[in-house]
Image (cartoon, helix red, strand yellow):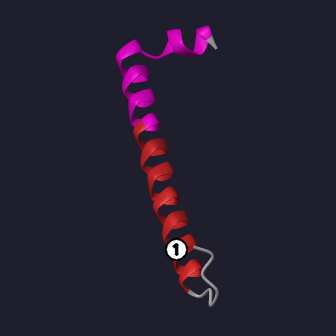
């Protein structure tokens, strides 16, 4: 692993990790929003309210 990092320049590796982290964060937020939206949609179909 250290040889692989040494082969590439450090700034490139750093930016690649930053971009990868940002993409993962965006994917997580989008999936969370869709999960909450789907959960709320299924909850509106319930005929008996528990609250």
The percent position of residue 36, horizontal first and vertical second, equals 51, 65
The percent position of residue 25, horizontal first and vertical second, equals 45, 43
Q: Looking at this view, is 42 or 31 the one in front?
A: 42
Residue at 45%, 35% in the rendered image: 21
Quadrant of the image containing the C terminus: bottom right
Residue at 64%, 14% in the rendered image: 1
Q: Looking at this view, is 26 or 49 the one in front?
A: 49
Q: In this picture, is 35 found above or below 20? A: below
Residue at 60%, 81% in the rendered image: 49
Q: Which residues are magenta?
A: 2-21
On screen, residue 22 versus residue 5, left or right, reads left
Q: Would residue 17 be counted in the magenta stretch?
A: yes
Q: Secondary structure at mark 1?
A: helix
Which of the 4 image quarters holds residue 11?
top left
The percent position of residue 20, horizontal first and vertical second, equals 46, 37
Q: In this picture, is 47 found above or below 28? A: below
The percent position of residue 50, horizontal first and vertical second, equals 63, 76
Q: Would residue 51 be counted in the magenta stretch?
A: no
């Amino acid at each position: 692993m250290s040889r692989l990092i040494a082969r590439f320049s450090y700034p490139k590796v750093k930016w690649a990790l930053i971009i990868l982290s940002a993409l993962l964060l965006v994917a997580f937020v989008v999936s969370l929003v869709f999960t909450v939206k789907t959960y709320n949609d299924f909850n509106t179909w319930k005929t008996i309210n528990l609250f």
